[in-house]
């Protein structure tokens, strides 16, 4: 049995987890900074870094206690080393390296995007490549064919906003607060997804685009306000949220299916914060069934940023490549290769 401690501090979640053999989550502690950033309407990098510094030690301690282990039981310490906010990444990377140095354990630097991909493997012992994976987060939107462990082919990616970014920006315009994804998801449940036909961009292409959709929703909403629609804002706003969400999900599902068709992958998987979206999950499960495929949807808590996905990825990476040198830094623009 191999136990790895994984740290995640690339954005606004300070997280640590202990994972056994790359699959079984022994503990996962996530301290969200959402309340700190909400009044700014988005993540403020400097505020995030400072909060990570304060939270990382107690979060690691909680993860070890929850897993019932101490440093002597661990086999490696891993941290997300990119992509993400430079100052925020440095906190997790420095903490993991310091622990590695103090304990003599190997250090493993983990790619955040690869980790979102590996979230599907957690708690799924019989998952096997090849997989067609849709990674949808606040910073990234891409389809990836995972041909084997460590072997990825990026099929399509967004040419402008990420899907999560579109949720967050539209939510801000609709006055729904931050983060926007969960707020729109909740409100959309009461709306009619067919009420307004917003544009579906890039039909027939592998890449994604959400900037035009966002503008269409914002213009529609402004038009409503000008027309004095505040009289019955709740139902109307729910229709806007549901129609916007449907346009995003239509595009995401179409591209995931196209990536699966082109690669012949018999399995679909989701990763990243937007993979928590209830409509996306339902639609992916539906198309998987309709096309005779299997769908792996990570549990909600493992879709948004967490340490378990970092520890899981580190287990596979350690076996394939060995430890990461302690003089390797963090890379805010790290690509998925
Ligand atoms: O993966 P993540 O936690 O952080 C990044 O790596 O970016 O993703 C955060 C994003 C945010 O944009 C948030 O609005 C979105 O995921 N999100 C959702 C939902 N939950 C989180 N979007 C749509 N529906 C949700 N239920
Ligand atoms: Zn993420």
Image (spheres, rainbow, N blue to C red):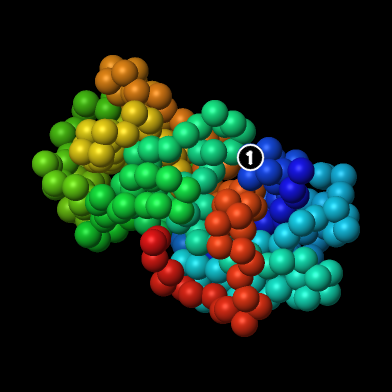
Pointer 1 local density, CA inside 10 Å: few below 14, some 14–19, many at least 20: many
Q: Dividing the picture into quarters, in which one does residue 5 lie? A: bottom right
Q: Is mark 1 within 8 Å of ligand 2?
A: no
Farthest residue toward the bottom?
A: 327
Q: Which residue is mark 1?
A: 23
Residue at (25%, 39%) from the top-left corner? Answer: 263
Horizontal and vertical percent for residue 105? 77, 66
154 sits left or right of 204 in the view: right
As drawn, 57 above or below 178: below
Horizontal and vertical percent for residue 297? 47, 32
**In front of the other: 244 or 334:** 334
287 sits left or right of 49 in the view: left
Task: Tell me if residue 332 can be seen.
Answer: yes
Please identify the quadrant where the C terminus is shown: bottom left
Residue at (71%, 73%) from the top-left corner? Answer: 97
221 sits left or right of 124 in the view: left
Farthest residue toward the left?
A: 204
Q: Dividing the picture into quarters, in which one does residue 59 lie? A: bottom right
As drawn, 215 above or below 326: above
Horizontal and vertical percent for residue 319? 60, 55
Residue at (85%, 59%) from the top-left corner? Answer: 71
What number of labels is visible?
A: 1
Residue at (37%, 52%) from the top-left corner? Answer: 152
Horizontal and vertical percent for residue 289? 34, 18
Please identify the quadrant where the N terminus is shown: top right
Q: SS for tag 1? A: loop
As drawn, 19 above or below 31: above
Task: Tell me if residue 62 can be seen.
Answer: no
């Amino acid at each position: 049995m191999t136990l790895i401690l994984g740290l995640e501090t690339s954005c606004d979640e300070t997280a640590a987890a202990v994972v056994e053999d790359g699959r079984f989550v022994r503990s996962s502690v996530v301290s969200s900074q959402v309340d700190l950033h909400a009044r700014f309407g988005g993540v403020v990098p400097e505020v995030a870094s400072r909060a990570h510094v304060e939270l990382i030690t107690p979060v690691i301690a909680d993860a070890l206690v929850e897993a019932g282990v101490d440093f002597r039981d661990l086999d490696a310490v891993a941290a997300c080393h990119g992509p993400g906010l430079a100052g925020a990444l440095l906190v997790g990377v420095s903490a993991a390296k310091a622990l590695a140095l103090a304990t003599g354990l190997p250090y493993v630097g983990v790619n955040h995007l690869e980790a979102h991909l590996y979230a599907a493997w957690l708690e799924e012992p019989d998952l096997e490549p090849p997989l067609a994976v849709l990674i949808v987060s606040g910073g990234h939107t891409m389809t990836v064919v995972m041909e084997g462990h460590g072997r990825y082919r990026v099929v399509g990616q967004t040419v402008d906003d990420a899907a999560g970014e579109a949720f967050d920006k539209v939510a801000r315009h609709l006055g729904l607060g931050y983060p926007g994804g969960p707020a729109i998801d909740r409100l959309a449940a009461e709306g009619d997804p067919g009420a307004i036909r917003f544009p579906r961009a890039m039909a027939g292409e592998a890449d994604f685009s959400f900037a035009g959709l966002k503008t269409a929703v914002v213009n529609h909403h402004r038009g409503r306000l000008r027309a004095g629609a505040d009289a019955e804002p709740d139902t109307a706003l729910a229709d806007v949220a549901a129609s916007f969400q449907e346009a995003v999900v239509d595009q995401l599902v179409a591209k995931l299916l196209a990536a699966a068709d082109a690669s012949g992958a018999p399995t679909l998987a989701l990763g990243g914060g937007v993979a928590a979206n209830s409509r996306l999950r339902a639609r992916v499960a539906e198309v998987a069934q309709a096309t005779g495929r299997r769908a792996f949807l990570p549990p909600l808590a493992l879709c948004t940023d967490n340490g378990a996905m970092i520890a899981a990825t580190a287990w596979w990476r350690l076996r394939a490549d060995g430890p990461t040198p302690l003089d390797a830094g963090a890379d805010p623009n790290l690509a998925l290769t």
